[in-house]
Image: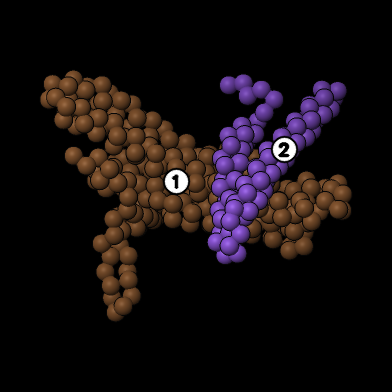
C-alpha cells in the first residue's frame, strides 16, 4: 500500500482541464467546489431574499438577519466603527464563503477548496485590497502613507520604520492566507492519517487491524467534530482579523 | 470568561504574532536567496535575509506589545474617569 500516494490523492488538487484552441482551461476539483459553493450560496441567498412566507422561508430569513447582526455587532462595528458599516456586505460574504468551503470538505467525495494556497491567497488579496481601499478612502494617499509611521517618531527613524511598517502590513495579509490554508490542510491530513492507521496495522496482522479499528474510528470521529469547530473558528478568525486590520488603518491613532 | 487585561482582539493578535514572526523570517530568507541567485553572492543574501527577518519579526512583536499597553492604559484612564462621575 502506497501511503504517500493515498495521502497526496486525498489532499492535492486534481486537474482534468481541457485545451481549447491552444488555451488551457484548468478545471480542477477545487475550482469545481468553489463554483458549486458560490452557486449554492447565490441561489440560496437569493431565495431567502425573496422573503417567502412559508415556514422555511421565515426561519431562514430570521437566521440570515441574526447572522448579519452577529457580523455587524460582533466584528465590524467594534473594530471599524461606523465607517465600517458600508463594508458589511463584504464581511458577511467572506465569513459565509470561508465557512461553507470548509464545511463542504467534510462531505464525503467533496474537497475543501480553502486547503489550496491559491484560494486562500486570493481571499487574503481581497482583504488586503479592502484594507488598502479603507486607508486611501479615509486618509487620502499622503495621509495613508503618513499613517504607517507611528506618531512621535524622530525624523531620522522614519526611513527605517516606514519600510518595516509597509512590510508588516504585507506580512499580516500573507499570514491571513497561510493560517487558513494550514488549518484546513492539516485537519484533512490528520483525518486521512487516522483512517490509514487501520490499514497499515492490518497489513502487519489482520487481527491487529481489527483491534485498531475501534480506537482509530473513535479518534476519527473526534477529529471530524474538531474539524467542524475549526471550520467555524477559522471563518470567524479570518473575518475578525480582516476587520481589525481594516479598523487599524481607518483609526490610525 | 475572564480575559485578564487583554481584550478579545488582543488575544487574537497575540496568537497571530508567532505566525507573523515565522512568515517574516521565511519571506526575508527567500528574498535573500533570490538575491543570491541573481547576484551570485551566496551565502550573504541568505544571512542578511535571516537577520532582517528576525529584526522584522521582533519589531512586530514589540510594536504589538506597545500598542496593547497603550490601549490598556487608555481604557484604565477612561474607567477611572467614569468612576469619578
Label 1 SS: helix
Q: Chain B colour?
A: purple
Identify the image quadrant of residue A107. Answer: top left
Which chain comes out brown in the rendered image?
Answer: A
Tell me the SS state at disc 2.
Answer: helix
- Relative image position of residue A17 (x, y in whole percent): 28, 65
Image quadrant where residue B63 sits: top right
Q: Nearer the viewer, mark 2 or mark 1?
A: 2
Nearer-the-camera pick, A166 or A233: A166
Taking depth in this image into account, of B84 and A97 the one nearest to the observer is A97
Residue placed under numbered mark 1 in the picture: A181
Gap between marks 2 and 1 measured at Cα: 27 Å
Position of residue A156 relative to residue B20, above or below, is below
Q: Residue at x 62, y 21 (%)?
A: B2
Q: Residue at x 62, y 55 (%)?
A: B45
Q: Which residue is mark 2?
A: B62
Amino acid at each position: 500500500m502506497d501511503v504517500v500516494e493515498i495521502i497526496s490523492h486525498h489532499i492535492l488538487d486534481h486537474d482534468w482541464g481541457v485545451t481549447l484552441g491552444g488555451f488551457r482551461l484548468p478545471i480542477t476539483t477545487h475550482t469545481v467546489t468553489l463554483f458549486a459553493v458560490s452557486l449554492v450560496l447565490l441561489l440560496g441567498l437569493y431565495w431567502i431574499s425573496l422573503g417567502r412566507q412559508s415556514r422555511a422561508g421565515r426561519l431562514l430569513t430570521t437566521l440570515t438577519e441574526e447572522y448579519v447582526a452577529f457580523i455587524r455587532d460582533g466584528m465590524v462595528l467594534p473594530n471599524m466603527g461606523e465607517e465600517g458599516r458600508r463594508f458589511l456586505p463584504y464581511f458577511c460574504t467572506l465569513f459565509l464563503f470561508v465557512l461553507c468551503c470548509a464545511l463542504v470538505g467534510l462531505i464525503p467525495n467533496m474537497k475543501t477548496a480553502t486547503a489550496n494556497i491559491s484560494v486562500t491567497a486570493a481571499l487574503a488579496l481581497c482583504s488586503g485590497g479592502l484594507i488598502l481601499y479603507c486607508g486611501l478612502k479615509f486618509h487620502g494617499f499622503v495621509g495613508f502613507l503618513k499613517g504607517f509611521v507611528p506618531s512621535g517618531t524622530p525624523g531620522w527613524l522614519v526611513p527605517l520604520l516606514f519600510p518595516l511598517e509597509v512590510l508588516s502590513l504585507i506580512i499580516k495579509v500573507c499570514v491571513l492566507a497561510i493560517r487558513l490554508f494550514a488549518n484546513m490542510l492539516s485537519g484533512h491530513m490528520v483525518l486521512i492519517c487516522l483512517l490509514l492507521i487501520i490499514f497499515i496495522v492490518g497489513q502487519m496482522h489482520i487481527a491487529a487491524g481489527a483491534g485498531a479499528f475501534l480506537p482509530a474510528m473513535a479518534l476519527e470521529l473526534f477529529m471530524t467534530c474538531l474539524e467542524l469547530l475549526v471550520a467555524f473558528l477559522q471563518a470567524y478568525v479570518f473575518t475578525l482579523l480582516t476587520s481589525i486590520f481594516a479598523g487599524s488603518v481607518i483609526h490610525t491613532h | 470568561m475572564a480575559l485578564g487585561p487583554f481584550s478579545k482582539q488582543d488575544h487574537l493578535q497575540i496568537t497571530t504574532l508567532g505566525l507573523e514572526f515565522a512568515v517574516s523570517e521565511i519571506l526575508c530568507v527567500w528574498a535573500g536567496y533570490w538575491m543570491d541567485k541573481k547576484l551570485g553572492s551566496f551565502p550573504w543574501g541568505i544571512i542578511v535575509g535571516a537577520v532582517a527577518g528576525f529584526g522584522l519579526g521582533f519589531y512586530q512583536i514589540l510594536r504589538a506589545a506597545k500598542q496593547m499597553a497603550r490601549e490598556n492604559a487608555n481604557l484604565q484612564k477612561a474607567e477611572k474617569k467614569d468612576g469619578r462621575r
